[in-house]
Image (cartoon, rainbow, N blue to C red):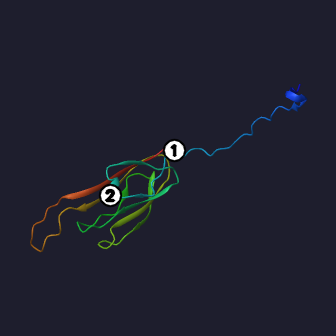
């Protein structure tokens, strides 16, 4: 049964059609970083499955960073670049599946000793925990 509404002055107003369904894309579980640097050291970041990101550690003359590694296949390295001592260390990663990965790199704190000299063995660490929901 359809209803007709009567408005003033004798005009008829048909009922409005139901609102059209709208489609929205599902919200991403987390905003992925595009680049991680020493400023992110010690942090935990969230990366969505399939997203790619870069870790870039600059050479500031204090020592050369080792290659950045992941301790889990939830986050895999795609490409290692950089040629110490010129540009530091850079690695591209992709989040493969749900899980947690720790990305790490180290460098010596003390300069190299001259031949026969003594040097310290202290290391500086870079660590970022990546969660993939």
The residue carrying pointer 1 sits among few (fewer than 14), some (14 to 19) or many (20 or more) residues within 10 Å by Cα, namely few
Q: Say which residue label 2 marks.
A: 38
| Residue at (29% x, 67% y) in the render | 59
Q: Secondary structure at mark 2?
A: helix
In the rendered image, the residue lying farthest to the front is: 9
| Residue at (77% x, 34% y) in the render | 18
Q: Say which residue label 1 marks.
A: 29
Q: Give above or below for 24 relative to 79.
A: above
In the drawing, does residue 69 fall left or right of residue 123? Answer: right
N-terminal of the pair, mark 1 or mark 2, is 1
In the drawing, does residue 74 fall left or right of residue 111? Answer: right
User: Residue 42, percent across and down?
Assistant: 31, 50
The residue carrying pointer 2 sits among few (fewer than 14), some (14 to 19) or many (20 or more) residues within 10 Å by Cα, namely some
- Relative to the observer, which residue lies in front, 60 or 82? 60
User: Residue 100, percent across and down?
Assistant: 42, 46
Please say if the residues under marks 1 and 2 sit with CB atoms less than 8 Å apart: no
In the drawing, does residue 117 fall left or right of residue 1? Answer: left
Quadrant in the rendering for residue 66: bottom left
Q: Quadrant of the N terminus?
A: top right
In the drawing, does residue 75 fall left or right of residue 6? Answer: left
User: Residue 116, percent across and down?
Assistant: 9, 72
| Residue at (64% x, 44% y) in the render | 24
- Relative to the observer, which residue lies in front, 11 or 101? 11
Quadrant in the rendering for residue 33: bottom left
User: Mark 1 to mark 2: distance in Å?
Assistant: 25 Å
């Amino acid at each position: 049964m359809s209803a007709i509404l009567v408005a003033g002055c004798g005009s008829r107003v048909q009922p409005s059609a139901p609102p059209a369904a709208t489609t929205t894309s599902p919200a991403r579980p987390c905003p992925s970083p595009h680049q991680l640097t020493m400023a992110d050291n010690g942090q935990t970041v969230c990366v969505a499955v399939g997203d790619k990101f870069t870790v870039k550690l600059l050479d500031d003359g204090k020592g050369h960073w080792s290659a950045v590694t992941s301790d889990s296949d939830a986050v895999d390295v795609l490409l290692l670049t950089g040629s110490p001592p010129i540009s530091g260390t850079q690695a591209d990663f992709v989040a493969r599946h749900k899980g947690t990965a720790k990305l790490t790199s180290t460098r010596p704190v003390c300069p190299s000793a001259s031949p026969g000299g003594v040097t310290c063995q202290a290391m500086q660490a870079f660590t970022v925990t990546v969660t993939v929901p």
